[in-house]
């Protein structure tokens, strides 16, 4: 089956259309009343900026260990620095925050459905990914116990 199938490539086959769906849902359906939309825009911009910061910092911290697949690369190291000090999955957190921000920015509450679906998906994907990380890195269970999964200091 190769690296793609054995590395969790099927997760990506779901992830990319789901991200697209979340982006579309943030722009369709009923819109917030104008006063609510005006109030939501700055919150949306803040969520997008925070999400992008987590995403970019997560990617940068991974260095040569970065892979789009959930299975860690051969020769990868366990990264516990940068955003990985406060959350085990900053790239996924970044995606969820950006989706939430996009929904708030555009003022279409239907986008929250896409954001919730993304959060559920990333939770499931990271649970699967953590099985591989535990197999590869003996220190992973201790890191896991001391670091939140997706929401810093909460979950």
Image (spheres, rainbow, N blue to C red):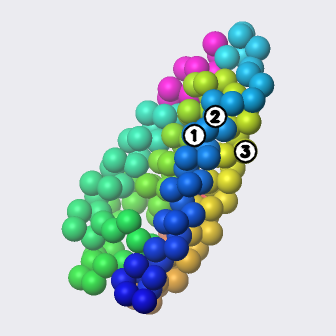
**x then y, percent, for residue 139:** 40, 83
Residue at mark 2:
26
- The reply to whether residue 87 is visible in this rendering is no
Look at the image and say whether residue 90 sits in the magenta stretch. Answer: no
- Asked if the residue at tag 1 contacts the one at tag 3, i.e. Cβ–Cβ closer than 8 Å, the answer is no
Q: Nearer the viewer, residue 80 or 96?
A: 96
The secondary structure type at the circle numbered 3 is: helix
**Residue at (24% x, 82% y) in the render:** 75
- Circle 1 sits in a helix, a strand or a loop, which is it? helix
How packed mark 3 is, by other alpha carbons closer than 10 Å (few <14, some 14-19, many 20 or more), is some
* Residue 144, placed above or below residue 94: below
- Real-space Cα distance between discs 3 and 1? 11 Å
- Left or right of 143: which side holds 150? right
Tell me which numbered mark, 2 or 3, is placed earlier along the sequence: 2
> What residue did someone put label 3 on?
113
| Quadrant in which the C terminus appears | bottom right
- Picture coordinates of residue 4, whole percent (x, y): 40, 79
Q: Nearer the viewer, residue 17 or 103?
A: 17
**Predominant SS of the magenta segment:** helix
Magenta residue check for 40 = yes
Determine the image quadrant of residue 38.
Answer: top right
Q: Looking at the picture, does residue 135 appear above or below residue 61?
A: below
**Category of crowding for the residue at label 2, using alpha-carbon neighbours closer than 10 angstroms: few (below 14), some (14–19), many (at least 20):** many
* Rendered position, 36 above or below 143: above
| Region in magenta | 38-46
Quadrant that contains the N terminus: bottom left
Q: Is residue 26 left or right of residue 42?
A: right
The residue where tag 1 is placed is 23
Mark 2 vs 1: CB contact within 8 A? yes
Distance of label 2 from label 3 (alpha carbons): 9 Å
SS type, badge 2? loop
């Amino acid at each position: 089956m190769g690296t793609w199938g054995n590395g969790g490539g099927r997760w990506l086959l779901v992830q990319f259309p789901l991200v697209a769906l979340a982006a579309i849902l943030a722009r369709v359906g009923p819109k917030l009343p104008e006063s609510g939309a005006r109030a939501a825009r700055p919150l949306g911009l803040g969520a997008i900026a925070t999400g992008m910061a987590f995403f970019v910092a997560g990617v940068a911290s991974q260095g040569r260990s970065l892979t789009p697949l959930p299975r860690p690369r051969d020769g990868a190291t366990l990264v516990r620095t940068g955003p990985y000090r406060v959350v085990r999955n900053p790239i996924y957190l970044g995606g969820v925050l950006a989706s939430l921000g996009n929904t708030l920015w555009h003022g279409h509450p239907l986008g929250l459905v896409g954001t919730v679906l993304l959060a559920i998906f990333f939770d499931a994907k990271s649970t699967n990914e953590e099985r591989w990380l535990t197999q590869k890195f003996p220190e992973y269970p201790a890191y896991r116990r001391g670091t939140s999964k997706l929401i810093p200091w909460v979950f």
